[in-house]
Image (cartoon, rainbow, N blue to C red):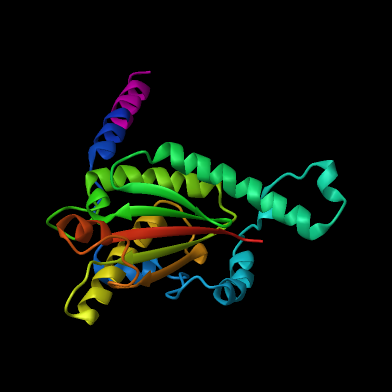
Amino acid sequence: MMNKLKFIFFTLIFGTVAACVQYQSPDRATWPTYLRGASFTDMTDTARLAKKPIYEGLGGRTINQAVKQSAKMEYGDKTNNDSAISIMYMSELESKLYDALRKPGMSVQRAGTDIIVLLVRDAIMELDAPDISETGDDTLKIISNILKKYDATFIEIAGYTDAMRDANAAHALSLDMASRVGVYLSTHGIKTCRMFIVGRGAARPIAGQDEFGRLTNRRVEIRIAPVR
């Protein structure tokens, strides 16, 4: 009985300590291992079509497989039924993300059936170091848990910077941010066969180039698309 109590005590202590340890990105040399299976390209329709057989071969589900269809859905026009299922599934996902991410520097947007989670860099990373912050750890953990539940989706992780004189440096920095988030998701149970990772440098600014705008343009966007 005493040994059992000791085991329970040390388990609780270990769990408490582990919960208090802030996440740190693995050594950069190990990133290719964590991101094996991810595609380092834009999540275009063509890229998704090419990736789908690999995704399904590794146990990935389509939305039709993930959603329990009603008897009514078994009949009628298949295209319309598939569209209705996708809309319902993605609407539920959008609602979960929106409710969970009501924080400064974050937003959840809809683009057709896709969902875009916008994360300003300073909301998820250390101000003076290129690593995930404590707040970012909490946020990305929430996103990971939701994406694990809504797993019939592809995920594009895109990094962006503010305007920089050196375009190559901007691309490298944006790819670092995107890859760092990809590694985090990978270590928290998100299959890399779902991922597309890209660095877009200073492209597609969403704000001006004043001090506040530059902070907003430094961001990571997670675009989530249904697998049909």
Q: Is residue 65 visible?
A: no
| Quarter residue 141 falls in | top left
Q: Residue 20: say if magenta.
A: no
> Where in the figure is residue 110, as x and y percent of width and height?
50, 52
> Where in the figure is residue 122, as x and y percent of width and height?
22, 52
Q: Which residue is situated farthest in the top direction here?
A: 1
The quarter of the rendered structure image containing the C terminus is: bottom right
Q: Main secondary structure of the magenta part?
A: helix
Q: Which residues are magenta?
A: 1-11
Image side of residue 184 versus residue 131, left or right? right
Image side of residue 214 versus residue 180, left or right? left
Q: Which residue is situated farthest in the right direction here?
A: 75
* In the rendered image, the vertical position of residue 100 relative to residue 4, given as above or below: below
**How many marks on residues?**
0
Q: 222 or 105, which lies in front?
A: 105
> Where in the figure is residue 174, as x and y percent of width and height?
28, 69
* In the rendered image, the vertical position of residue 173 relative to residue 142, given as above or below: below
Residue located 84% across and 57% down the image? 77
Residue located 42% across and 58% down the image? 222
Q: Is residue 200 visible?
A: yes
Residue located 35% across and 26% down the image? 8
Image side of residue 182 versus residue 68, left or right? left
Q: Residue 7: say if magenta.
A: yes
* In the rendered image, the vertical position of residue 146 relative to residue 204, given as above or below: above
